[in-house]
Every structure is written in C-alpha cells, then in structure tokens.
Image (cartoon, rainbow, N blue to C red):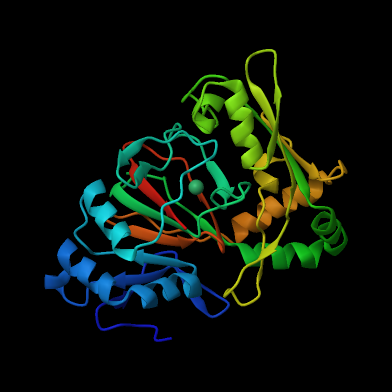
Amino acid sequence: MEFSSKEFKVGKCEGQKMVDGEIMPLVFQPPESNLEGLESLLLALKNNKDWFEAMIVKNSAVLLRGYDIRNAEDFNEIIETFGWDDIRYVGPAPRTHVYKRVWTANEGPLSEFIYYHHEMVLIKEFPKKVILFCEVPPPEGGETPFVPSFRVAERMLEEFPKVVEEMEKKGLKYTFTALSNNDTSSMRGRGWEDAFGTSDRAEAERRAKALGMDMEWLPNGGVKTVLGPRSLMKVFDGRKGRRMWFNTLVGMYGKEFSSAMMADGTTIPENVVKRCEQIIEEESIQFKWEKGDILFFDNLALLHGRRPSLPPRRVLVATCK
Ligand SMILES: [Fe+2]
C-alpha cells in the first residue's frame, strides 16, 4: 500500500511517534494551497476512500490538517463521504447532538481528565472508527492523547505474565453505578434514563440485557450495572495479529462509582493496576489541536482520553462501524 497519494501531502505534527515502524498520527495536508477548501477535500476523499481507510488501519491514527473545515455541517459532509454506517453512542459521557451524525465529544467539566479508553469497549458492538473535529482549539491543555493498545498488552505480559494470563483466562467483571438524573457537574453524570434512552425501569432493564448487562436498582433511585465476563485482550482482523489491551481495567478499578475484578470475583492486585496506569501514560502520544483538525482513530487499536483544559474548547465527534 502506497504511503502517499497525489491528492494528499504527508505532513508532520508535534508529538508524533514512530511505533513499530508506523508514524502516529499520520498527517495529511492539502498538496497545494489552493486545494484546502472543503470541496477539494471531499473530492480527494471520494477518490481515495479505500486507500484512506487502509491508512487508518495501518497507522491507527490519521490527522487531516490545513483544510478549511469550519463547522459541524462541514464535518458531517466529510463523515458521509466515506459511507461508513453510524453507530449510536452508549456510555457514561454526557453528549449533546449537534448536527446529523455529529455530537459534542463530552459535556463534562473541562477541568477533569477523561481517562484513556477504547470507545464503548464494554458494549457488544463498538465503533471501528472514532472521528474528532476541532472547532475551537483550547488555549491551554485539552489535548486528546492516545495510546497504541498493543504496546500496553506487550508490556503488561512482559512484567506480569502470570496475573495477565489469569485475567485473560477468567475474563473481567465490572460494576458501574449510575445516578438517576442527568448531572453534568460530573463527566460520569449521565443518568441512567439518558444512558438507556428511557425513564421506564423495565424498558431500561430490557435494553441493558440486550447490551449484555445486568441491573440492580438502588434505594436512591440509581442503578448498579454489572458487566461480565468481558475480555482483557482482543485480536482483530487486519491488525498484524496484535493483542490489544481492550478493556477498561484502570479506568474502573477501585473508583467511587465503579469497580473491576476477575470474572469469578478474584481480586486484581493493586500494584498491577497502578503499573498498568504508568505504562499507558508512558506509551501515550500527545499532539496539540489546531482549528479545523480532523482526527481519525482506529478504535480497535487505540485508547484515547482528554486532558484537563482551559475554556473555550469545542471538539465534536462521530462514531462509525
Ligand atoms: Fe472517547
């Protein structure tokens, strides 16, 4: 597969890393300055659809930079050019619908760090692609760091072969407590009514079951959701046989509203989780948002998060199959 195309120029960005022979993120720019408009970009994408998708899989992250992309309508047109199916978001982040397939990435407070995750990792059908658009770059902080998941799996296997094999064999179990009303004072504040799209308990239970979750109602009107068994690692087609660290162990372990353990109830040693957190941070890739940036993530290969940010910051998202 060609690394370049006549219609895209390979660029550079701050914080890029070479990981196992691949640049992350791969940066594409207009080949000439008169081709930076939306129409030129749409045409270039249309002519190189399969190639572009292959680049996302090969390099895990592709950044379009230097195009004149202004708003959610522009972003939506770009998404629709590919013809990838939309996938509805299910999860704890409070999100607002903006336009057609475009949503805000997270309405939670900018001062909080959103911990690294694969999008919808606990749901049976998760998106293959997570696509972000920077409408208003943050003045300070607010990066969207990301992590090649296979590197985390490799290093955890190196350092803790026994526990990792045990977790892999048994699988993981998570619990998550949701409040009863929407409360955007916390980024975990998405109420169960919103999360399941209904305020009817029986219907919420039915929908939870369909997503592979069990529910336990709490006296305060909230709900405790139990998920498991879930995998620790996964291998996906077309990704070099890499074992991805496809779980949310660090994000949910020992927290106020969540927990993680092995599927049979065995406790996971705290030092293993703490070390995993360090490894994830060490392997992370940072870049700075610029206005008009569009970033394509291979959600099967990368964890991503959001650093605390000063306002204003507006990053929009679309998720695709
Ligand atoms: Fe996310």
Q: Left of 29 or right of it: where is 321?
A: right
Tell me what residue is drawn at x 38 percent, y 78 percent. Answer: 51
Q: Look at the image and tell me whether residue 106 can be seen.
A: yes
Quarter the N terminus occupies: bottom left
Q: Which residue is painted at 88% across and 61% down in the image?
A: 162
| Image-quadrant location for residue 149 | bottom right
Horizontal arrangement in the rendering, residue 235 relative to residue 165 (left or right): left
Q: Left or right of 53: which side holds 249?
A: right
Foreground residue among 289 and 89: 89
> Can you say whether 203 is above or below 231 in the image?
above
Residue 262, relative to residue 310: is it above or below?
A: below
User: In x, y percent, where is residue 284?
Assistant: 55, 59
The answer to whether residue 291 is seen in the rendering is no
Decide which of 212, 170 is in the foreground and name it.
212
Q: Residue furthest top?
A: 219
Q: Residue furthest left?
A: 34
State the residue in front, 25 or 247.
Answer: 247
Task: Name above or below for residue 254 compared with residue 115.
Answer: above
Residue 224: image location, x then y, percent = 69, 27
The percent position of residue 236, horizontal first and vertical second, equals: 62, 68
State how many labels appear. Answer: 0
Identify the residue at image location x=40%, y=56%: 131
In x, y percent, where is residue 123?
61, 47
